[in-house]
Amino acid sequence: MVYQVLRVERKGGGYAIITFNRPDKLNAANAQVFGELAEAVRELDADKNVGCIILTGQTFTHPKKGTPFPVFSAGADVEEFAGIGKTEAGFDFIKICFEPFKAIEFSETPVIAAVNGAAFGFGFEIMGACDMAFASLSAKFALKEINHGAVPAWTVTRGLEKLGKNVVAYLCMSAVEIGPEEAKRLGVVIDVFEDEELMPKCEALAKRIAANSYIAKTFIKTTLNRRAMEDYQEAERYMPTIFASKFMQGAFARFLKGDSKNVK
């Protein structure tokens, strides 16, 4: 498949790298990102020459500031979400949103998140769906959905297994932005590296994982994620109501009019 908002590279050490590549939107996720990422993970998972996958971002020139901006994914594309006003539309859309999450968790191939920069909203949550995550010193993390009346659906369901109730409550209700060392302390990432060391460290780990038993890795993944379908179905039941709420639709309307001071 030809990818437009991703770069997909197969490496000689038995692993592959998926890189978000939507510079004009700072890797914000829309339906195309959801679809391509799900397809890329499934394609690589079916390739027996790929024993591990790395998901990462890159450094762009900030479209407004003109300065280098390292970004994993700056969140969801608000313009696309703003069109969801009816519960039925929300029900269909949330299933599209969850496709890459399901692809990662249900794949038999381990996935490493190499968080090189901003990981907000979708970026934070897709990182969490990966089997393990590492960060660079330029990384930063936040779940700001509550600012516009939304809920970080993956974090309050699947994220509980990784982060626990206290951490999930803190991040989801405060919308606080944290740095890489704080993310490590809270258990969001395993370790933090200098910017230039992040990918070499993750690639070395990917090679090591790729060389291990395919059957053993499959058993480990399926055991760790055995509750995933139940959690996704729960989120699919309540998210359409949240999408259709007056608070959330009002926030989106203000955002589209350019009054985004309270929508982050």
Image (cartoon, helix red, strand yellow):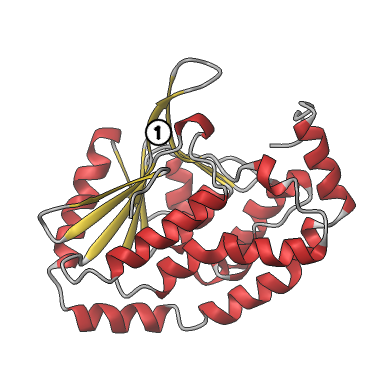
Q: Whole-percent x and y of residue 173?
A: 71, 52
**Residue 48, above or below 120:** below
Q: Going by the picture, which residue comes out furthest to the front? A: 1
In this view, the residue in front, 71 or 257, is: 257
Q: Is residue 109 left or right of residue 76?
A: left
Which quadrant of the figure contains the C terminus?
top right
Secondary element under disc 1, as helix, strand or loop, is loop
* Mark 1 residue type: Ser
Q: Whole-percent x and y of residue 123?
A: 51, 48
Residue at image coords 30%, 34%:
195
**Residue 55, above or below 213:** above
- Pointer 1 residue: 138
Residue at image coords 75%, 30%:
260
Q: Is residue 213 left or right of residue 122?
A: left
Residue at image coords 76%, 34%:
255
Which quadrant of the figure contains the N terminus?
bottom left
Q: Going by the picture, which residue comes out furthest to the top? A: 66
In this view, the residue in front, 23 or 199, is: 23
Q: Whole-percent x and y of residue 7?
A: 32, 45
Res 32 visible: yes
In this view, the residue in front, 132 or 54, is: 54
Res 166 visible: no
Q: Whole-percent x and y of residue 104?
A: 41, 66
Q: Is residue 261 left or right of residue 16?
A: right
Residue 152 lies in what quarter of the image? bottom right
Residue 239 lies in what quarter of the image? bottom right
Q: Is residue 113 left or right of residue 87?
A: left
Residue at image coords 67%, 76%:
234
**Residue 7, above or below 105:** above
